[in-house]
Amino acid sequence: MGDWSDVTAVWGKLDADTGPQALARVLIVYPWTQRYFGTFGDLSNAASILGNAKVAAHGSTVVGALAKGVANPDAVKATYAELSKLHCNKLHVDPDNFRLLADCLTIVVALKLGAAFTPKVQATWQKFLSAVVIALGSQYV
Ligand code: HEG
């Protein structure tokens, strides 16, 4: 999957704010995704979403779950099989949303890395996220 060291290098440069920012962007840019987070309180405008502690915590959970994929590039599908079942059967999340999250995460990564996010790095990073997105959708029936 491309030059894997590019993925581990990106991963090593991300800070604790990465997940919160990525999920906040999903909720702001694609407001229909708010339907899954009815218990998260005020999501009525961008400032509320960016300042929402539950959004931040869940963003950290979501992006934190990518660590296993980064650590096991050859086992991405197996790594996310259970999470796929959970999102399908219990959470009823439309799998199209995984792509939206991946795209927002890529944008946050680009902002954080700046010029270091070269086209080559981007290519490998997006290939990795694409594998995760496919894995998360793989148990939908
Ligand atoms: Mg999901 C829970 C990972 C995208 C909606 N998500 C979770 C959990 C993890 C996770 C690890 C906790 C599972 C548990 O409690 O056992 N999510 C995860 C990943 C990705 C993703 C890795 C994509 C890369 N999730 C995602 C998207 C949505 C969503 C795009 C909706 C737009 N996730 C969602 C909801 C919950 C989780 C509603 C339950 C949250 C809660 O009740 O606290």
Image: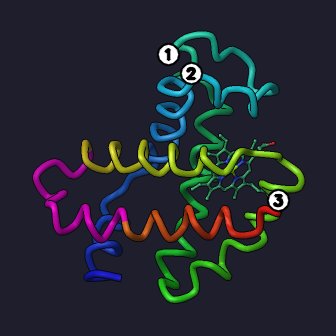
In whole angstroms, how far apart are the C-alphas of marks 1 and 3? Answer: 28 Å
112 above or below 41? below
- Of the numbered discs 1 and 3, the one sitting upstream in the chain is 1
Judge by depth and name the residue closer to the eye, 115 or 1. 1
The amino acid on which the numbered mark 3 sits, given as a three-letter code, is Leu
Which SS type dominates the magenta stretch?
helix
Q: Residue furthest left?
A: 115
| N-terminal label among 3 and 2 | 2
Q: Which residues are magenta?
A: 112-126
The x, y position of residue 110, in whole percent, is 25, 48
Find disc 3 in the rendering and name its residue: 86
Residue for badge 2: 49
* Element under disc 3: helix
**Residue 79: x %, y % from top left:** 66, 78
In the drawing, what numbered circle is on residue 135? none
* Contact between labelled residues 2 and 1, with CB atoms less than 8 Å apart: yes
Does mark 3 have its CB less than 8 Å from ligand 1? Answer: yes
Give the residue at the far right of this rendering: 90
Q: Nearer the viewer, mark 1 or mark 3?
A: 3
Quarter where residue 117 is shown = bottom left
Q: Position of residue 62 (x, y in %)?
A: 61, 53
Whole-percent x, y for residue 90 in the image:
89, 52
Look at mark 1 in the image and give the residue it sits on. 46
Q: Nearer the viewer, residue 71 or 130?
A: 130
Amino acid carrying mark 2 in the image: Ile
